[in-house]
């Protein structure tokens, strides 16, 4: 199994060298500006352009995941506050009912 992985890595290295595509680690470490500059280097259907486009998608998914986590946290806080108001309203309503029934008798 190790030979197959090494063979795939070697083939990937050769393909990246042939099309002048940086390694995945280098692409992931690039800033957005650097990635955009790299993207300008390739024609739209070039393998390099596809690799860069995949990196943009990966970054978008990471950003979307962060936003989704923040949204869930915010929704949880809102649900807790709404529940607290509901409980307090129920207790106040019950107390008022008892008081008003005693007063109006």
Image (tube, rainbow, N blue to C red):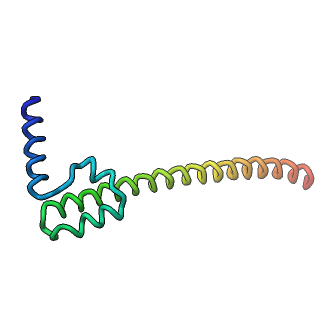
Q: Nearer the viewer, residue 61 or 74?
A: 61
Q: Residue 17, how many percent across, how many down? A: 12, 52
Residue displayed at 13% across by 52% down: 16
Q: Nearer the viewer, residue 92 or 12?
A: 12
Q: Nearer the viewer, residue 69 or 79?
A: 69
Q: Quadrant of residue 45?
A: bottom left
Residue displayed at 65% across by 51% down: 81
Residue displayed at 33% across by 51% down: 29
Q: Quadrant of residue 52?
A: bottom left
Image label count: 0
Q: Residue 60, how many percent across, how many down? A: 35, 59
Where 20 falls versus 37 (above or below)? above
Q: Residue 62, how many percent across, how many down? A: 37, 53
Q: Nearer the viewer, residue 100 or 7?
A: 7
Left or right, residue 33 beside residue 67:
left
Left or right, residue 8 beside residue 30:
left
Q: Quadrant of residue 43?
A: bottom left
Left or right, residue 87 beside residue 57:
right
Quarter the N terminus occupies: top left
Residue displayed at 8% across by 55% down: 18
Q: Residue 36, how many percent across, how many down? A: 30, 66
Left or right, residue 34 beside residue 18:
right
């Amino acid at each position: 199994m190790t030979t197959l992985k090494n063979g795939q890595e070697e083939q990937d290295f050769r393909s990246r060298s042939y099309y002048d595509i940086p390694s995945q680690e280098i692409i992931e470490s690039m800033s957005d500006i650097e990635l955009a500059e790299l993207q300008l280097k390739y024609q739209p259907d070039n393998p390099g352009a596809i690799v860069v486009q995949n990196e943009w998608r990966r970054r978008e998914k990471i950003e979307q995941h962060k936003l989704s986590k923040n949204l869930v946290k915010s929704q949880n806080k809102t649900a807790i506050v709404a529940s607290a108001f509901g409980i307090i309203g129920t207790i106040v309503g019950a107390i008022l009912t008892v008081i008003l029934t005693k007063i109006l008798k």
